[in-house]
């Protein structure tokens, strides 16, 4: 499995394969399991359907590192448009943003300025901005920006961040973020990281995930536990039950198209479940990371391609 994971992560950076997949009917058809569509309208339609089924939603306009300030502002404009439609359609949805898409690797001040404008817009319409976490080289810069924005009283309720359990540093980061009352989405992590900064063994990543999830559940802040791993979910449920933590004090988060059966079951049991809904033409890196995270998805896609 680790070899297969590494192979898919490597393929996520393969430019010729990306061009082929993103520009062919075959590729777009394969991606449709995990990507809502290419346009804002596709994402809004899926969000409305999920809300109707009892799910909360996070919308993500796919894309990562931009190469110019113009591209960064263009990416931000899509999120501002999403926030307008979320308010207009009264969707129970928020947005999830990568700072490299907002220009982080070009100019950190640019990325922070754009994130601030999105957080303010989210606050105005009663929504929420989640700052995604990327590879470990950007962890501190991302946390610094989130903490500075969250320190502004008018933005405190409208911004949160993601923590990855495969990083050694994550427990210290969680402790600091919780102390500052910052909302966290906890995930395992989907980037290839060196052993110097991340747990190389899945068992250690899982153990850290459970440790961190208990810290989040034990805090008074509303957090999200992002996982499709039933062992991680069961551990969180058991801890919450043992400590009298109400189901409404946290949410499980899952990806669009992954473990729909489990998503529905959790909702039927009274848990809050948020579905992460990505859309857009730059879907290839995201798609490959989904295959890297769960190689069983490859078999699923192969079996079901002609049923789409």
Image: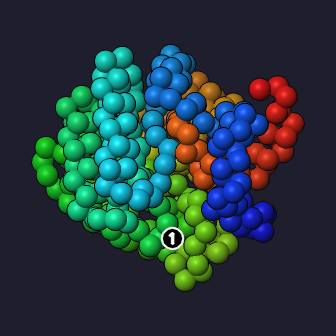
Question: In the figure, 73 relative to 151: above or below?
Answer: above
Q: Residue at horizontal 46%, vertical 28%?
A: 40
Question: In the figure, 131 relative to 305: above or below?
Answer: below
Q: Residue at horizontal 69%, vertical 57%?
A: 16
Between 127 and 60, the one nearer to me in the picture: 60
The reply to whether residue 188 is in sight is yes
Between 154 and 18, the one nearer to me in the picture: 18
Residue under label 1, please give it: 167
Q: How is the image coloured?
A: rainbow
The reply to whether residue 266 is in sight is no
Q: Is residue 4 left or right of residue 214?
A: right
Q: Residue at horizontal 20%, vertical 40%?
A: 120
Tally the marks: 1
Q: Residue at horizontal 64%, vertical 59%?
A: 15
Q: Residue furthest bottom?
A: 196
Residue 126 in which image quadrant: top left
Q: Quadrant of the C terminus?
A: top right
Coordinates of residue 307 in the picture (x, y in percent):
82, 25
State the SS at label 1: loop
Q: Is residue 215 left or right of residue 166?
A: left
Coordinates of residue 159 in the picture (x, y in percent):
28, 47
């Amino acid at each position: 499995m680790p070899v297969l994971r590494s192979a898919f992560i490597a393929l996520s950076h393969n430019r010729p394969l990306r061009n082929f997949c993103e520009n062919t009917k075959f590729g777009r058809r394969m991606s449709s399991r995990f990507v809502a569509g290419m346009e804002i309208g596709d994402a809004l339609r899926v969000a409305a359907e999920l809300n109707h089924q009892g799910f909360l939603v996070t919308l993500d306009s796919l894309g990562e590192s931009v190469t110019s300030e113009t591209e960064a502002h263009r990416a931000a404009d899509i999120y501002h448009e999403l926030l307008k439609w979320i308010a207009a359609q009264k969707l129970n949805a928020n947005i999830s943003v990568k700072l490299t898409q907002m220009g982080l690797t070009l100019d950190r001040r640019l990325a922070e300025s754009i994130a601030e404008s999105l957080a303010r817009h989210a606050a105005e319409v009663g929504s929420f901005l989640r700052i995604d976490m990327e590879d470990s080289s950007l962890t501190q810069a991302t946390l610094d920006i989130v903490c500075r924005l969250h320190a502004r009283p008018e933005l405190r309720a409208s911004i949160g961040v993601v923590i990855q359990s495969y990083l050694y540093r994550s427990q210290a980061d969680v402790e600091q973020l919780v102390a500052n009352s910052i909302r966290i989405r906890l995930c395992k992590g989907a980037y290839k990281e060196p052993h110097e900064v991340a747990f190389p063994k899945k068992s250690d990543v899982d153990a850290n995930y459970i440790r961190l999830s208990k810290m989040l559940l034990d805090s008074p802040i509303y957090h999200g536990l992002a996982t499709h791993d039933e062992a991680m979910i069961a551990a969180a449920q058991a801890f919450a039950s043992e400590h009298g933590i109400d189901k409404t004090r946290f949410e499980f988060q899952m990806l669009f198209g992954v473990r729909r059966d489990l998503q529905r079951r959790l909702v039927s049991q009274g848990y809050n479940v948020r579905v992460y809904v990505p859309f857009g033409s730059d879907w290839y890196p995201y798609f490959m990371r989904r295959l890297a995270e769960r190689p069983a998805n490859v078999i699923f896609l192969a079996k079901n391609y002609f049923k789409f």
